[in-house]
Amino acid sequence: MDGILLGLETALQPSNILICLLGVTLGTAVGVLPGIGPTATVALLLPITFEFDAVASLIMLAGIYYGAQYGGSTTAILLNLPGESSSVVTALDGHQMARQGRAGPALATAALGSFFAGTVGTIVLAAFAPPLAELALQFGPADYFAIVVLGLIASVALASGSTVKALAMIVLGLLLGTIGQDQFTGVPRFTFGVRELYGGLDFVSLAVGLFGVAEIIRNLESRQSAAIVTKKVEGLWLSKDDFRRIRNPVLRGTALGSVLGVLPGGGHVLASFTSYSVEKNLSKDPKKFGTGVIEGVAAPESANNAAAQTSFIPLLSLGLPAHPVMALLVGAFIIQGITPGPNVINDEPELVWGLIASMWVGNLLLVMLNLPLIGVWVKMLSVPYEVMFPAIIAFASIGCYSLGLNSWDVFAIAGAGVVGYFLIRWGCEAAPLLLAFVLGPLLEENLRRAMIISRGDPTVFMTRPISASLLILAALIIVVAVLPSVRRKREVVFQGEDD
């Protein structure tokens, strides 16, 4: 209780409230702008933190991170351009709702679900940080490997196509994730002598190309699709039926996100994909998922925002970044002369509890900031598509170029867009590919670490209870997915989506 009071006293100081407002506003803006994400923004603003004290700098940078989750959902819904990997799932149904003239309810669902999940995630962070951090500390490389495998296998349920195509997309994503220098030896792999590939493919370029440029090409090919996108949107609030439909998905997504966000790695990504998969499996009519159901927006948005809050647990308790932004926040700690780790809660209570309390303040500010401005984002749909798509590509290109100041990233957008277009034509979903691309390096790293620790003994994955249980569950999912009766049912379910 003393820590919470100290945190509120710190976060509610007028200067810190203004800093928090600045952070969440910047976060929303960079989330909305195609191709510009929180990682690049935090990296660019990191030198500014020299001018702030430790509390103010961390509050601002954290606000940019979880504020971008809100903004990313806006772009994913209105333009089908997920700036963050966790927004990919939101685009599946959110963009379809926008095409049907229900962008307002979709954005309102994202905002309200995010606020509730963010609030609960903050409470979890404040109340259970020590025991949850201790639990995460018990996970070894074999357990992390099993978690990633389970997440990838579960993503098969997201693909609106055959199981074989979904598995092929996962394999392709893993292969793309291996491009670049080897994590352990530094030896270039699959670079073909191209120096720009030594650091691997850029996520933002790949995501914008696969989902944004590919969608633009598809819309230009079909005049009917463009007309639907530019249709006037009315009704910017939720009906009683909408509230009833999103209640349980928000609760389940919040619970999943709060748990998965603690795990170092792609916790917010796994939370978003897993929550969508859960809702799809629990639905009485799963064939509607991917066609614009509000549950498909509520669950992943709640999950990724809860995970965004609880992902601070390993950072504050262990000094272990669970996200590229968290790695930059470690740099912010060091700039301020603070060593993140198990002692930071005791050594810097004002900083830690002030940061935690500011997250609740920031989530409240985000609702106050985003809900009144929903109409502004919706008005973007009234812009003629022939005018809008060049602006989208321009913003995306500028954003990707600013990440590394390298024109190679702009060419990567074009290449990924062509690949994404052909994937659409061939009936393949890009979502499993992107998930595998994000989690591939984590999968490889923990596989090799586990094998090094066990001196090459592969049974290590089955002798540890946690990893063995997760791998068995993943195997059961595969077996069930390929059963003839289940396969026929999947074909019937996804037939409606293809139509």
Image (cartoon, rainbow, N blue to C red):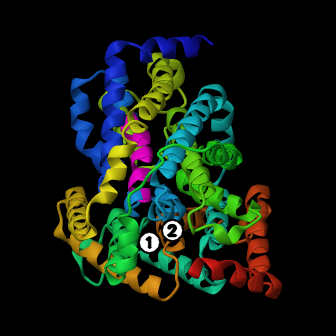
State the predominant SS element of the stretch in magenta: helix
Q: Amino acid at mark 2?
A: Gly
User: Residue 2: which quarter of the image?
Assistant: top right
Image point (26%, 60%), residue name: 383
Q: Quadrant of the N terminus?
A: top right
Circle 1: element type:
helix
Q: Which residue is label 2 attached to?
A: 440
Nearest the viewer among 364 and 456 is 364
- In the rendered image, residue 435, in percent from the top left (x then y), is placed at 52, 66
> On the picture, is 164 further left or further right than 86?
right
Residue 170 inside the magenta-drawn segment = no
Q: Amino acid at mark 1?
A: Gly
Inspect this view and state whether residue 233 appears: yes
- In the rendered image, residue 390, in percent from the top left (x then y), is placed at 21, 68
- In the rendered image, residue 79, in percent from the top left (x then y), is placed at 37, 61
Circle 2: element type:
helix
Image point (46%, 11%), residue name: 9
* Tag of residue 128: none
For this orientation, the residue located farthest to the right is: 485
Q: Do the CB atoms of the residues marked 1 and 2 lie less than 8 Å apart?
A: yes
Nearest the viewer among 263 and 243 is 243
Q: Residues within 10 Å of mark 2 (few under 14, many from 20)?
A: many
> On the picture, is 480 further left or further right than 37?
right
How far apart, in angstroms, are the residues tagged by discs 1 and 2?
A: 5 Å
Image point (70%, 59%), residue name: 278
Of callouts 1 and 2, the N-terminal one: 1
Nearest the viewer among 309 and 160 is 160
- In the rendered image, residue 284, in percent from the top left (x then y), is placed at 77, 64
* Tag of residue 177: 1
Which stretch appears magenta?
63-77
Q: Quadrant of the C terminus?
A: bottom right
